[in-house]
Image (cartoon, rainbow, N blue to C red):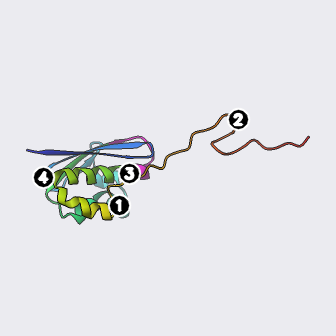
Amino acid sequence: MLIYYGTGRRKNSSSRVFMKNGNGNIVINKINIDKYVYMNLKKYIIISPMIITNLIDKFDLFITVKGGGYSSQLYAIRLGISRAIVKYNENFKNILKKLKYLTRDSRSVERKKFGLKKSRKKPQYSKR
């Protein structure tokens, strides 16, 4: 039995995706996807790479994700699934790349600078 692995990151969240032969079960942090994701649109964000490549009923996914917020976790999972699919079959790389499922979103929180309240917010100016 072959297991394909993909890592996905977005902001502070990171996911590990293990893809093996099965019948379409998706488990995230030991919880079924239907309980972990409460909206169909959010569920579609996760499984869209599987739907596009017609692999939704051929593989089981075991996913661990931590850090960040809910939405960034979903996009980290999507990137991890896309990378695992490419390891399974290189021919899917062009399809997923056109949809930008293989690009890592490098935007992150800007660091706080000294003398400022946040990264760009300055203390209020007082004339007297």
Q: CA distance from mark 3 to mark 1?
A: 9 Å
Amino acid residing under circle 2: Gly
**To which residue does mark 3 refer?**
104
| Up-down relation of residue 78 to residue 44 (above or below) | above
Q: CA distance from mark 1 to mark 2?
A: 39 Å
Label number found at residue 87 = none
> Residue shown at 42%/40% (left/top)?
67
> Residue shown at 16%/52% (left/top)?
88
Q: Residues within 10 Å of mark 1 (few under 14, many from 20)?
A: few
Instruction: Confirm or deny contact between disc 3 and disc 1 (CB under 8 A).
Output: no
Q: Nearer the viewer, residue 112 or 35?
A: 112
From this viewpoint, which residue is outermost toward the left?
Answer: 1
Left or right, 121 with respect to 62, comes to: right
Q: Earlier in the sequence, mark 1 or mark 4?
A: 4
Q: Earlier in the sequence, mark 4 or mark 2?
A: 4
Amino acid residing under circle 3: Arg
Q: CA distance from mark 4 to mark 3?
A: 28 Å
**To which residue does mark 4 refer?**
22
How far from the left and from the top, in percent, is residue 124? 78, 44
Amino acid residing under circle 4: Gly
Q: Earlier in the sequence, mark 1 or mark 2?
A: 1
Secondary structure of the residue carrying tag 2 is loop
Label number found at residue 115 = 2
Q: CA distance from mark 4 to mark 2?
A: 55 Å
Query: Which residues lie in the magenta part?
Result: 65-75
Q: Earlier in the sequence, mark 4 or mark 3?
A: 4
In which quadrant will I find the C terminus? top right
